[in-house]
Image: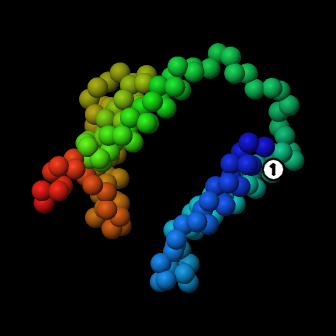
Amino acid sequence: MLLLGLFLIYGWLGQDITLLPAQQQASFHPRTLPNFLAAVGIALSVGLLVFPQNRERVQLRGLRWMRFATFLALMSLYGLCIRPLGFIASTSLFLIAGFALSGERRLLKMIAIGSGVAVTFWAIMDPGLGVFIDPFPSLISRAR
């Protein structure tokens, strides 16, 4: 029921995404993916309600709640660091910290993968698709 409610709200809020006049008749626009995700989520949620697979209650004991809370704090810190540190540095640090929190201990591997993913994602979004993401700290970018 909770998932169904969340997907219904997500689909409803997705309709508030404004479209430019040229996007009104386009087959793919900013609302396309949210509408698709909401529809799939609603269908799967209804499917789970109609055809439940497991009638056992979910056991919340024994879960790693401290790790969960630390990940939430890490995500919040990431959101606060995007502007001052820039996308590449903050995303790299976020991924490296997430890997360490998940149990990875090889520092060079964490740095290589975290930095590689951040730079690759930035390269796809900014130069590739034209979606501007500030790659460097705000002070450096304003000086350009």
Which quadrant holds the C terminus?
bottom left
Residue 52 in the image: x percent, y percent?
Answer: 84, 40
Which quadrant holds the N terminus?
top right
Q: Is residue 13 left or right of residue 93?
A: right
For the point 51% across and 74% down, the residue is 19
Residue 142 in the image: x percent, y percent?
Answer: 17, 56
Q: Nearer the viewer, residue 70 or 117?
A: 70
In the image as oriented, which residue stretches furthest toward the left? 143
Q: Amino acid at mark 1?
A: Gly
- Label 1, residues with CA under 10 Å away: few <14, some 14-19, many ≥20: few
* Vertical comparison of 3 with 72: above or below: below
Residue 72 in the image: x percent, y percent?
Answer: 49, 32
For the point 28% across and 37% down, the residue is 112
Q: Secondary structure at mark 1?
A: helix
Q: Nearer the viewer, residue 106 or 55?
A: 55
* Vertical comparison of 2 with 38: above or below: above
Q: Which residue is mark 1?
A: 47
* Vertical comparison of 110 with 140: above or below: above
Labels in figure, total: 1
Residue 136 visible in the displayed image: no
Residue 21 visible in the displayed image: yes
Q: Is residue 53 left or right of residue 5?
A: right
Based on the displayed image, in which of its 4 quarters is residue 84 positioned? Answer: top left
For the point 73% across and 21% down, the residue is 59
